[in-house]
Image: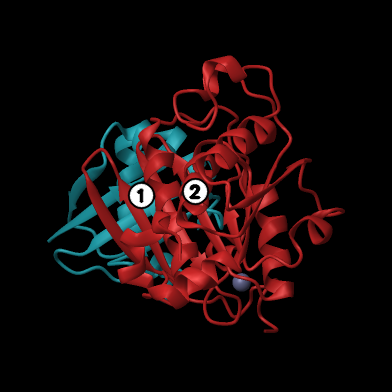
Chain colours: A cyan, B red
């Protein structure tokens, strides 16, 4: 099973890539953990507060906010697209 | 109606043009986003355009803030912008206000406006403006940029989510935000489009739809944003 992760703003800059593909993850939490494993502590600092997602960071699955789904426990299916972005404030 | 608007009247009608002439729009910040948005709003024939900023023009602004030119360096941005906008369209009344928007003056600065356009460079002031928009039930067009990415969502209080529904918490954001000049060009232009649509009643504004412009991959995404039933700013309306 494969899912896509799409990153925006500071996250994209940090990872150096706008689109990643990861395999064998069951839910959003596992996908985020995979991302942290690949890119380390700095990305964790942006995304997580202890075991929970930082409230300022938006995570969407196929365009739907995980807040309105099952949060980090939202189940993933083959081909799902996860979009992650921090608030964007430049002008 | 003036020949100036002949190319757009077939889209918005004489009636729509009249609505623009009778409309009042405020552009909150006259940097990268605000330069472009205010330019197109004046060009479209908005009758009254208030522009608010408290900065002076710096040389590092010039890659994107197209209303300010090299000979404006050191000048207040509202003064530099007002000069060009009134030369562009003498039929638009430009009202430049050299002030910083805060909780204390937001009511006074934004009241009576038909549409509020985002031209800010920080989330904190945006949230002050968002709260004003919700409590006075005025449309507020959110636009923001980072690098080659731009974000846009139109807030019509009561009809869709507000900015606080979108971003329940403000993180600390670093001061230096990289921006390719064309990015606020794209988003400022979309903001003006939304304002013209709201005023004339033409088309469908992006209420509850966050538009993400990705200049690096040259694509647009649309993300559905629901109202947050817990939102302390807009849950009561
Ligand atoms: Zn809200």
Q: Is residue A91 visible?
A: no
Which residue position is annotated with label 2?
B37
- Residue placed at 53% from the left, 16% from the top? B70
Instruction: Please tell me whether mark 2 or mark 1 is closer to you in this view.
Output: 2
- Residue placed at 62% from the left, 48% from the top? B123
- Element on which disc 2 rests: helix
Seen in the picture, residue A79 relative to B95 is either above or below; the reply is below
Q: Residues within 10 Å of mark 1 (few under 14, many from 20)?
A: some
Q: Residues within 10 Å of mark 2 (few under 14, many from 20)?
A: many
Which residue position is annotated with label 1?
A33
> Between B43 and A18, which is closer to the camera in this rendering?
B43
Decide if ligand 1 comes within 8 Å of the CB at mark 2.
no
In the picture as drawn, the residue positioned furthest to the front comes out as B2
Residue B180 lies, in percent from the top left, at 38, 30
> Between B97 and B45, which is closer to the camera in this rendering?
B45
Q: CA distance from mark 2 to mark 1?
A: 41 Å
Left or right of B86: which side holds B55? right
> Between B58 and B73, which is closer to the camera in this rendering?
B73
Residue B133 lies, in percent from the top left, at 68, 67
- Element on which disc 1 rests: helix
- Residue placed at 36% from the left, 52% from the top? A32
- Residue placed at 38% from the left, 72% from the top? B12
- Write down the chain letter for disc 2: B
């Amino acid at each position: 099973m494969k899912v896509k992760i799409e990153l925006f703003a500071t996250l994209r800059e940090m990872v150096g890539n706008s689109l990643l593909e990861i395999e064998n993850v069951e839910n959003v939490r596992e996908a985020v953990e995979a991302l942290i494993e690949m890119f380390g502590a700095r990305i964790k600092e942006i995304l997580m507060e202890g075991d929970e997602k930082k409230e300022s960071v938006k995570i969407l699955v196929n365009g739907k906010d995980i807040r309105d789904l099952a949060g980090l426990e939202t189940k993933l299916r083959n081909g799902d697209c996860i979009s992650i972005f921090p608030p964007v404030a430049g002008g | 109606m003036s020949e100036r608007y002949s190319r757009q009247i077939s889209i918005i009608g004489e009636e729509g043009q009249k609505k623009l002439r009778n409309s009042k729009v405020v552009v909150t910040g006259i940097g990268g986003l605000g330069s472009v948005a205010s330019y197109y709003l004046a060009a479209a024939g908005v009758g009254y355009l208030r522009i608010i900023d408290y900065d002076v023009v710096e040389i590092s602004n010039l890659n994107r803030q197209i209303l300010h030119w090299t000979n404006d360096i050191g000048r207040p941005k509202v003064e530099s912008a007002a000069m060009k906008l009134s030369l562009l369209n003498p039929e638009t009344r430009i009202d430049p206000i050299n002030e910083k928007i805060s909780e204390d003056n937001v009511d006074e600065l934004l009241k009576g406006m038909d549409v509020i356009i985002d031209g800010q460079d920080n989330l904190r002031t945006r949230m002050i403006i968002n709260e004003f928009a919700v409590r006075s039930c005025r449309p507020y067009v959110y636009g923001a940029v980072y690098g080659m990415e731009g974000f846009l969502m139109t807030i019509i209080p009561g009809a869709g989510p507000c900015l606080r529904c979108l971003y329940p918490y403000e993180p600390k954001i670093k001061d230096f935000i990289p921006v390719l000049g064309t990015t606020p060009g794209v988003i400022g232009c979309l903001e003006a489009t939304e304002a013209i649509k709201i005023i004339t009643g033409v088309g469908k504004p992006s209420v509850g739809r966050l538009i993400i412009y990705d200049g690096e991959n040259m694509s647009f995404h649309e993300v559905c944003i629901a109202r947050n039933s817990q939102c302390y700013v807009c849950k009561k309306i």
